[in-house]
Image (cartoon, rainbow, N blue to C red):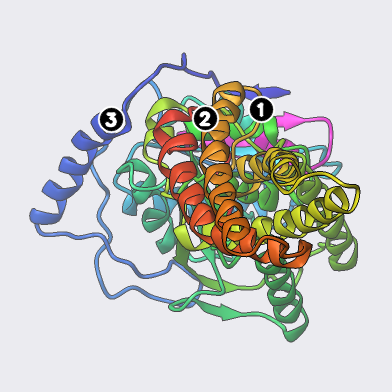
Amino acid sequence: MNTVSPTPEPGSRVIASRVSAEADAAADAECGGGRMTGARADPGVTSTEPAVAFPQQRRPSPVVEVVVPVHNEQEALDGSIRRLHDYLTHRFPFDWRITIADNASTDATPIIAQRLAADLGRVRLTRLEAKGRGRALRAVWSSSDADVVAYMDVDLSSGLEALLPLVAPLLSGHSDVAIGSRLVRGSRVVRGPKREIISRCYNRMLRMAFRTSFRDAQCGFKAVRADVARVLLPAIENNQWFFDTELLLLAERNGLRIHEVPVDWIDDPDSRVDVVATAMEDIRGMIRVARRIVAGRAGVDLPPDVRAARLPRGMGRELRMFAAIGVCSTLAYVVLYALLRDGGTSSFTANFTALLVTAVGNTWANRRLTFGHVGGDGAIREFAESGVVFVLGLAVSSVGLALLHQVWGSSGVFVEIMTVLFSGVLATVMRFVLMRAWVFHPARSPRRNSPR
């Protein structure tokens, strides 16, 4: 990877302290008579409000780095970068840098990019010899010294006035990932019916398969806190178009906060994206990520401040998953209890054995699927404490069996099973409360996923 322009030394910073001075400067400029306009700098649209060049104190490293990945974009590159540069200079209140990430262009794109880097301040070129939008973003984001890394498509289909709302929640610490969306209320989209239908179907598939909360995974307008990006990037396997979706799936799976911004979007009629090939790649990527989640390999080691501020997991989702696992465990218990009793085992021994076997499977499934804990960290403690919960459940069911035999000496296997299941309702409620509030309490689990 070759980079044109010197790269400042990276350093660790607290985002809020980095941006406060620049935010004050922006506020001073606004109070001084001019104010930042939200008008989109599209051709043919004239703003009625004066643009303000925000006073920006140059720093060794930018607050926001905007990456524009390109491959054979000689026609659009010069005009788009100059338009973006003008917008950031006059309408963006934070220190910034534009990085053109050329991935294996074979036309005049690298030459034009070099000229732009030489002519315009705070523009640099990164050249990769291998093709792939995800690969280009990975290369630049992983080495960035900015607080927030962002990217947008070179055609600037998304209105630039959405850039500040995109990065503001990340700079304030409110969110970890921010995405532009064409599918939320407030967005204005101009594109053909074919792309509209494909986009909506794809995002619907994501919501059905992964229960995602975000609505538009494919919009080429995203930003991430740099410290979060450095943790997520090694976990992302795709280097092409599915890169965006995989980043979002992993982010949400790990409980990161994703902020969605409505955008004004005008589709590029000259887009050369192969829709069919991209769709097939996306489907294969979804299958791969789903397998990874089921295998418990979707967790990442988050920075401490990010981990502490993760979204609380929904009680409703946990209850549904706990109930589904409970149904499977109950069916397994019934079959095992009946087989043991049919083989001549006493009711108490059959109850103990069936409960023990299903409790181990139940604990494993709830640990991974309901409460999102993966890996070996804390596993021994969690299983040991689940053993205490098992003993309480065993005590409740054993008391139920003892009362049954006291009242009805020869009740039969069916009645015994119904008695145990009835008494197990109380044990189930108690088990869920103890697992959530004690065994798998979030504060006791430094490494876990946050499935939805």
Q: In which quarter of the image is the C terminus?
A: bottom right
Query: Going by the picture, which residue comes out furthest to the bottom?
Result: 193
Residue 177 position within the rendered picture, expressed as x and y whole percent measured from the top left: 49, 47
Give the number of the mark in front: 2 or 3.
2
In primary-sequence order, the first of circles 2 and 3 is 3
Q: Specify start and end residues of the magenta stretch as a single range.
A: 115-139
Secondary structure of residue under mark 3: helix
The residues tagged by marks 1 and 2 sit, at their Cα atoms, a distance apart of 17 Å
Q: Residue flagged by tag 1: what amino acid is it?
A: Gly
Q: Any mark on residue 375, and which?
A: 1
Q: Residue flagged by tag 2: what amino acid is it?
A: Glu
Q: Any mark on residue 56, and which?
A: none
In primary-sequence order, the first of circles 1 and 2 is 1
Asked if residue 244 is positioned above or below residue 98 in the image, the reply reads below
Q: Which residue is drawn at 83% across and 56% down?
A: 338
Q: Do residues under tags 1 and 2 come within 8 Å of each other at their CB atoms?
A: no
User: Residue 120 colored magenta?
Assistant: yes
Q: Mark 2 points at which residue?
A: 385
Mark 1 crowdedness (10 Å alpha carbons): few <14, some 14-19, many ≥20: few
Residue 254 at least partly seen:
no
Residue 31 is left or right of residue 358, and the answer is left
